Image: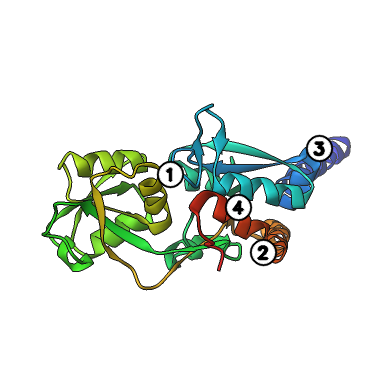
Amino acid sequence: MKKKLAGLIIATAALISISCSKKNVNQKDLLAQIKEKGYITIAMEGAWAPWTYHDEKDQLVGYDVEVGQKIAEKLGVAANFIETDWDGIFAGLDARRYDIACNGVEITEERALKYDFSQPYAYTHTALIVRKNNEDIKSYEDLKGKTSTNSIGSTYASLAESYGAKVITIDSFDQTLELVEQGRVDATLNDNATFYYYQKVQPENAFKVAAMTEDSSKVAIPIRKGEETQSLKVAIDKAINELKESGELAAISQKYFGTDLTK
C-alpha cells in the first residue's frame, strides 16, 4: 500500500511539473519568443492602397509594409507578413496567430479596452465619400436614412451607423468605391490619405469628399494585452520613436501618401 501511495505521489508530482512547464512556455515573454524564432508575424490586408497592397509585379508593398519591415529590423528579426481580411486581423491576434497588426488601425476606446497600442505612427481624418453628382449628402448628419459601405468591424462602419446610416459590409476599399459608383449605396467612409492617393492614381474618377472629421484619428499597432507582451510594446514604441527622430518614418509617408502623416 505504501509503495502504491508513493508511486501515486511521484506520478502526480510529474504531471504537475509537466503542467507548470507548459504554462511557463505559454506565458513566455512574447518579445523573447520572437527573437528566438527570428521573425515577427504581422497581420495586414494587402488590399488597401497605399497602406498595404500589391504592385504591378504582385509584390506586397505599402506604407505599413515598410513600417513593419523597419520595426522588425529594429527588433533584430525578419518581418513575416500574413494577409487576411479586416475582420480576421483581430480574430488572429486573439488566437495568437499574429504577434501584431500593421494595417492603418485606429485607436478607439473600445479597442483600447481589449488591446494595448503602440504610440501612433500616423494621423488621419475620416472622409465622407460620395459620387460627384450627389447633392443630398453634404455632411455626416445627412447620412441618416442613407446607405454606406465599409469593412465589417471598422471604425468607419461604426461612425456611419452612429449617424443613422445603414451599412453594407464588404472586404476592400476598391469594392466600396464600386458600390458607390454603381449607385448601389450612397456613400463610403475612409481615411483622407487613402482617398487622396486614389485620386492621384485615378484622376478621372466619379467621387468627391462631401465632409471630413475635424479631429484626427491616431493610427497605431495593436498588441494583445498581457504581462507577456509588455516588453514587445516597449520595444515597438522605441523603434517608432527612432524612426520618427531619424526622419525615416516621414520619408516613407511622403513616398506613399505625398505628405507627412506622422505629425
Circle nearer the viewer, 1 or 3:
1
For the residues labelled 2 and 1, the Cα–Cα distance comes to 27 Å
User: Which secondary structure, mark 4?
Assistant: helix
For the residues labelled 3 and 4, the Cα–Cα distance comes to 58 Å
Horizontal arrangement in the rendering, residue 177 relative to residue 103 (left or right): left
> Badge 3 local density, few (<14 within 10 Å), some, or many (20+)?
few
Horizontal arrangement in the rendering, residue 35 relative to residue 225 (left or right): right
CB of mark 3 within 8 Å of CB of mark 4? no
Instruction: From the image, tell me which residue sits under label 2.
Output: 244
Q: Earlier in the sequence, mark 1 or mark 3?
A: 3
Instruction: From the image, tell me which residue sits under label 3.
Output: 11
Q: Earlier in the sequence, mark 1 or mark 4?
A: 1
Locate the N terminus by quadrant.
top right
User: Which secondary structure, mark 1?
Assistant: helix
- Would residue 27 be seen by someone viewing this image from the given angle? no
For the residues labelled 1 and 4, the Cα–Cα distance comes to 23 Å
